[in-house]
Amino acid sequence: MATTQRNRRWLRKILLGVLILTGIVMVILFYVVATFDIEAHRAKIKSIISQSLGREVRIDGKIGLEVSLLPRFVVEDISIGNPSWATVPDLVKVKRFEIQVALLPLLRKEVKILELNLIGAHVHLERDQEGTPNWLMKRLDSGKLNTKVLPAVLDMHIEDSVITWHVKDRLSITLSIDKLETSLEMDEPFKLEGNLIYKDIPIGLPLRGGPLYRLLSQDSPWPIHGNISIGALPISLEGFITDPVRLQEIKLKMLLARLI
């Protein structure tokens, strides 16, 4: 009986010690993040992103760090360059780009992205004469996914943004994004909800697709379905995308739902 009580006391002491040590580590890590001058590393950050993407990256606005147990990195007026053959200089320009990361994985020199926010983005999409898309960069073309940056769940939000599709010898197609939201999970179906505008016609989502790992693997067609609204018309669609990263082929079957 006495031995059991001693063991319990030792167990409580060990658990208390672990909790105290964890708290100390969290405080130290929080202090390091809070005192880190991210602006001083602007050139290095830009260089790392440029080398990773294989594209020129410019950061014309401020770089900030909102300190909390879930730190948020904020970059303003960032742009990613296009290949030389493209119609416009930049693939994308973003007024405000936010990344929220988990704190503890930083101890293991890992970055776990929990949330991505894009505000005021303008994306320009097109293909060259051989059909190569301008959004295909080194990381995407390799077909390899760096799982160290992806958590179990990734929330993404896009607001007040525009996508322009440039087609040679044709008028460009522009789609405005009022708001888009998605919660990405590697093994769960893809979900996308939001409000778009095309030629003053409102488009309401949701869309559903296959799991994220299939979207990124490029090994098989990626299924997609949903019940959307175009203006006042409710439409059901179902189909698939072949090689979703390159958007090689999109096949959709659309049915006009009954209004009554």
Image (cartoon, grey):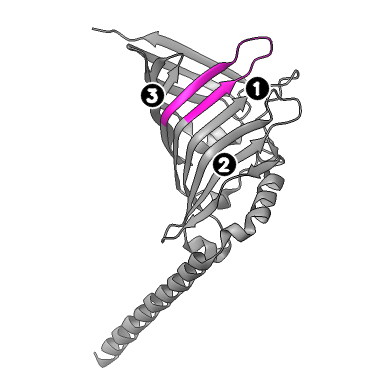
Along the horizontal axis of the image, is 194 left or right of 211? left
Residue lying furthest bottom = 2
Residue nearest the observer in this picture, 194 or 256: 194
Q: Secondary structure at mark 3?
A: loop
Q: Position of residue 240 (x, y in %)?
A: 52, 21
Q: Position of residue 102 (x, y in %)?
A: 47, 57
Magenta residues (range): 161-179
Relative to 80, does residue 23 appear above or below in the rendering? below
Find out whether residue 162 is within the magenta segment: yes
What whole-number distance in Å separates the C-alpha atoms at marks 3 and 1?
24 Å
Identify the residue at horizontal 68%, vertical 54% (top origin): 43
Relative to 7, does residue 43 appear above or below in the rendering? above
Task: Report whether residue 193 is seen.
Answer: yes
Check disc 1 and give the amino acid type: Glu
Q: Main secondary structure of the magenta part?
A: strand
Residue linked to disc 1: 126
Q: Secondary structure at mark 2?
A: strand
What whole-number distance in Å separates the C-alpha atoms at marks 1 and 2?
22 Å
Task: Report whether residue 243 is seen.
Answer: no
Residue lying furthest front = 61
Residue linked to disc 2: 77
The quadrant of the image that shows the N terminus is: bottom left
Residue linked to disc 3: 205
Question: Mark 3 or mark 2: which comes first in sequence?
Answer: 2
Crowding around mark 2 (Cα neighbors within 10 Å: few <14, some 14 to 19, many 20+) is some
Relative to 29, does residue 12 appear above or below in the rendering? below
